Amino acid sequence: MTNHPHQFPKLHNAAWPGVVGKGGEGNDPPIELDTMLDLTAAAEVDGRKFDGVDLFLFDPHVSIDATDKELEDLADRVRARGLVIGSVVAPVWEPTGGGSAAGDDEQVHAFLTQVRKGCTIAKKLRELGVRPYGVVRLDTATSVADWAKDPEGNQSKIADTLKAACDIAEEYDERLAAEGEICWGGMQSWRTMVDLLKRVGHPERFGFQADMAHTLLYLLGYNAPDDAILPTDFDWSDNEKKKAALKELTHALREWTIDFHVAQNDATVHGTGTHDKTGRHCLPNDPNGKLNIAEDAGFWLRDEHGDVLKTCRHICWDGCMFPNEVMHKPETWNSILSAMLSVQDAHGWNE
């Protein structure tokens, strides 16, 4: 235990890699939530374990229309494994019952309905005593291509929708965090993300979720070339230039950051289904990974003077799209927990 002296930020594993990219022809089947909980609870490094999980409010894991009885059962199942729940993801996209934040009145209504349902569940889990911290995550549910048809008009419409979402969040005493992923219109670059955060203008209710894998791609400007900080053919062996770029990026977004995902990324992009170009999550020890996980996390978790911020009371590993075969191996989760501990060791605190 003395090798890992800090207790905060708490260490969480994401359950949604058991659902995202699973099911359908040619894909691995979904991994049940109980299995994801078991894999998380079983991981152990130097006597330390995961503290909790973050959840996707989507079948077959947790229905966005879950009843109180189903949520009580969920809380019991999580507690029984010595875990808590942190952030939850609201399924705001049209294929999951939501709609575009830049859409027509019907689509916006569907989007906001999913936000309300997500906040309802988040509050209930707090009241059940199993969720001591965390946010409700969302994005714009708008493609970059659709956004680009009318950048100013769509950015304004998205901001209005998210202001309405903040009003909903206030009713439930919840906070919303926008996922910084380059496939979402209005969030496809660090500049458009900062612009949107300022337009919404409710930092007490609406902030930024920094995922190390996704925000790395902000540097390269794949879906917003004018906002690139580094060239797409950047030589990743130039660590000093990479750190300078991360410093510029985090200076712009850190003040808004209220939720944080530890991840690894190989700086490549791909598009799947309704997604525009977006990034891949890699295992922490992937030889193609471009991040020094513990060091680079510090750009988000420390301020300009190098002091630990303590803004995020928990951090979460995000590792979508790994094959089921990899996810069922205990060593996968031990290596991930080890990476999480390295971030806590470097930027953690005690209370």
Image (cartoon, helix red, strand yellow):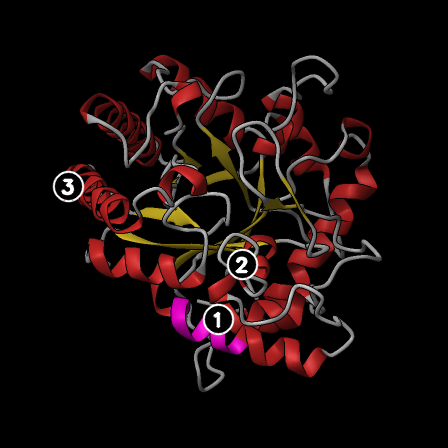
Which residue bears the numbered disc 2?
215
- The percent coordinates of residue 229 (x first, y second) are 54, 72
Label whose residue precedes the other's in the sequence (3 or 1): 3
Instruction: State the residue lying farthest toward the bottom.
Output: 305
Q: Is 105 in front, or is 147? A: 147
Residue 256 vs 41, above or below: the answer is below
Real-space Cα distance between discs 1 and 2?
A: 8 Å
Q: Residue at x 41, y 28 (%)?
A: 91
Asked if one can make out residue 349 in the rendered structure from this viewpoint, the answer is no
Residue 18 vs 286, above or below: the answer is above
Q: Amino acid at mark 1?
A: Leu
The part of the chain drawn in magenta is: 247-254
Quadrant containing the C terminus in the rendered view = bottom left
Q: Secondary structure at mark 3?
A: helix
Asked if one can make out residue 84 in the rendered structure from this viewpoint, the answer is yes
Q: Secondary structure at mark 2?
A: helix
